[in-house]
Structure formats: C-alpha cells, structure tokens
Image (cartoon, rainbow, N blue to C red):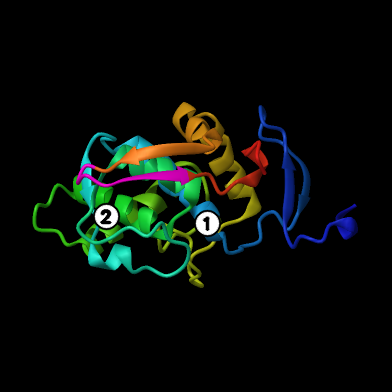
Amino acid sequence: FARQISAQQAVLIHADTGEILFGHNEHTRAPMASTTKIMTALLVLERADLSATVTVSERAASVEGSQLGLTAGEELSVRDLLYVLMMKSGNDAAYVVAAGVGAEISDDKSITPHEAVEVFIDEMNKFARENNMKGSHFTCPDGFHDDEHYTTMRDMFTVARLSVQSDVIMKYTKTVEEKFYYVSGENITWTNTNALINPNS
C-alpha cells in the first residue's frame, strides 16, 4: 500500500484513540511550510489577549513569502490578525501577531519586535514539548524554510487534533469572506485562499 503513495510521508490515525492505523515515514522529519501557522494560531489562543492591539513593525511588513500587504505603523487587534492568518496565510500577519504576543508574554516594555518574535518561537517549542511533539522544532511563526524548522506527520496530527477542537480556528478557517476594520482606521475585505470552501470557485 505504501508504494502506491506519492507523498514522502503519510499517516492515518484514529482521531479518538490516537492509534496509528497506517504509517509511511510518519516519524521522519520534514519541512512544514505554512502549516506552521496552525501552531502559531494555537499558541496565540492559549497565551494572548485577543482584544489587544498590535502595531505592524518594519520587519514584519517586509518578510519574505506570502503577504497580506500590511504596512508598518498600522494597528490591528490580535483577533483580526488571527482571523486573517487562518484565512489568508500571510507571513506578515504571522510575524506581527508573534511580535505582539511575544511582547505580552515577556511583559518587557523595552523589548524590540525581533526579540518578541524570538520569545514567541521559544514558546512554540515549549508548547510542542508540552504536547509530546518530539519530532518538531520551530524557528519562525510562518513556516518560511529553515533547515532547523521541521516536524513529522505524527506531530502534525497532534496540531490538527488540537486545532479542530478549537471553535475559533474552525470558525475562522470556514469563513469565505470578511471585512476588517483596523484599529488605526484602515479597512479591507479579505477572501479566504481556500477555494474548496468558496461557493463561487
């Protein structure tokens, strides 16, 4: 059966018991790309005040990869950033929310956005250990490639199981379109990048 699978890793797990029903390199380390953002969302929900306001930094506005087009100086709530993180998978949104939550966790008023993101990443790795994700290591909140940023299929099941237990994540990932009003006054309508849930696709 495994020879019929083109993927390098695969796993089929009983959702209730956690029993592995079928595995194909399920414990092999692999890059996780933007599925990292699910872990970012889980940590935000566990550690952050969703009503808190976060300011977009120069670094966050210029990160590589997929972007929402956030501009340095714009202010958004953590809730709105989490919403568009799940809807649009913006790397800039991941860095902005990581910086905001990292600063909140550190409770250090003088912390820089870069230092706050590092705090957040440390918490991602702590969260992974707390949830027995032994094959995972995080170096960023968005999933942009780094050789030291990796997971396994078995660990991603843990992330998926936790995410489907979250009413907030399930609501946000099911939203096709939403209009957002930034704290700093801007407004924009975002459409979910998942064409499978868009009735007009």
Relative image position of residue 11 (x, y in whole percent)? 73, 48
| Contact (Cβ within 8 Å) of mark 2 with mark 1 | no
As rendered, which of 100 and 76 lies closer to the eye?
Answer: 76
**Residue extending farthest left:** 110
Q: Is residue 20 visible?
A: yes
- Left or right of 109 in this view: 148: right
Residue at the image position 19 percent from the left and 46 percent from the top: 184
Q: Please indicate, yes or no, whether residue 38 appears anywhere in the rendered image.
A: no
Q: Position of residue 192 (x, y in %)?
A: 53, 44
- Mark number for residue 45? none
Q: Which residue occupies 28% across, 60% down?
A: 71
Q: Which residues are magenta?
A: 183-190
Res 99 label: 2
The residue to which callout 1 is attached is 34
Relative to 14, residue 1 above or below: below
Q: How many marks?
A: 2
- Side of 182 where 19 appears, left or right: right
Kindly state the secondary structure of the residue where label 1 is placed: helix
